Image (cartoon, rainbow, N blue to C red):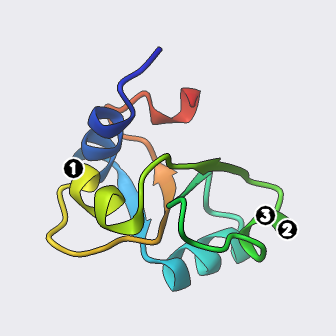
Amino acid sequence: MIDEARALRTAVQTGKVAVGLKSAREAVRKKQARLVVVASNCPDSELAKGTVKVHRFAGTNVELGAACGKPFAVSALAVIEAGESNILSL
């Protein structure tokens, strides 16, 4: 079992991540995203249509932003490159 918050923070710091619903949609559309993480209070209907794996974060968008180390709410993010993180094993 991996620590979800720690893996997210490491991916944001060392990898390439598209933060925000609009950016995540664009990464999925361009087939760049390897994983999409969506907050529990964010509708992911458009993101689920793609071929990429969608992981539902247990917390709200404010908690997802804090887990990523961002001082703002994050509804969704797309992991393009994991960096030193093991986030892709979710």
Q: Are marks 3 and 1 in contact (CB under 8 Å)?
A: no
Q: Residue furthest bottom?
A: 22
Query: How many neighbours does mark 3 have within 10 angstroms: few (below 14), some (14-19), or many (20 or more)?
Result: some
Q: Amino acid at mark 3?
A: Ala
Q: Is residue 74 left or right of residue 75?
A: left
- What residue lies at 21% left-to-right and 49% top-to-bottom? 13
Please give the residue where the numbered disc 2 appears in the rendered image: 49
Please give the residue where the numbered disc 3 appears in the rendered image: 48
In terms of image quadrants, where is residue 17?
bottom left
Q: Earlier in the sequence, mark 3 or mark 1?
A: 1
Q: Toward the viewer: 75 or 10?
A: 75
Q: Amino acid at mark 1?
A: Gln
Question: In the image, is residue 54 above or below residue 29?
Answer: above
Question: In the image, is residue 37 above or below residue 20?
Answer: above
- What residue lies at 47% left-to-right and 14% top-to-bottom? 1
Q: Of circles 3 and 1, which is in front?
A: 3
Q: Are marks 2 and 3 in contact (CB under 8 Å)?
A: yes
